[in-house]
């Protein structure tokens, strides 16, 4: 199925959850400083394994970075 991640279309497996999506795009879901929103709704980290993406989902992934 096709979804949009940070404005870019990507093909993923059907029934993929947020946690597995992060692994699929080579982000560590255990790392702190990652926030995920689906269709403009922030998904709490506690729900990443149970939140399944749908065809056409708009996913925004934000990573906090340190620096100055």
Image: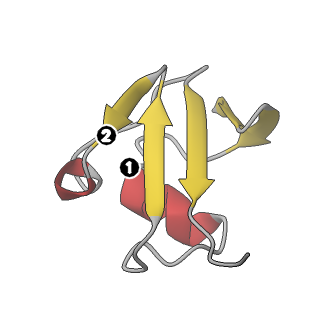
**Picture quarter with the C terminus:** bottom right
The CA distance from mark 1 to mark 2 is 11 Å
Does residue 25 lie above or below 10 as drawn? Answer: below
Residue in the picture at 62% in, 77% down: 66
The location of residue 1, given as percent across then percent down, is 63, 32
Q: Quadrant of residue 60?
A: top right
Most extreme residue toward the right is: 8
In-image side of 28 versus 24 (left or right): left
Q: Nearer the viewer, mark 1 or mark 2?
A: 2
Which residue is under mark 1? 17
Residue 14 position (above or below residue 38): below
Model colouring: secondary structure
User: Percent position (x, y) of residue 17?
Assistant: 38, 49
What percent of the width, then of the height, locates residue 23? 53, 71
Mark 1 neighbour class, 10 Å CA radius: few under 14, some 14 to 19, many 20 or more: some
- What residue sits right under mark 2 in the picture? 43
């Amino acid at each position: 199925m096709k979804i949009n991640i940070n404005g870019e279309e990507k093909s993923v497996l059907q029934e993929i959850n947020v946690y597995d999506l992060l692994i699929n795009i080579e982000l560590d879901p255990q790392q702190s400083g990652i926030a995920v929103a689906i269709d403009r709704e922030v998904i709490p980290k506690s729900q990443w394994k149970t939140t399944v993406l749908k065809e056409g989902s708009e996913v925004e992934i934000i990573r906090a970075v340190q620096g100055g």
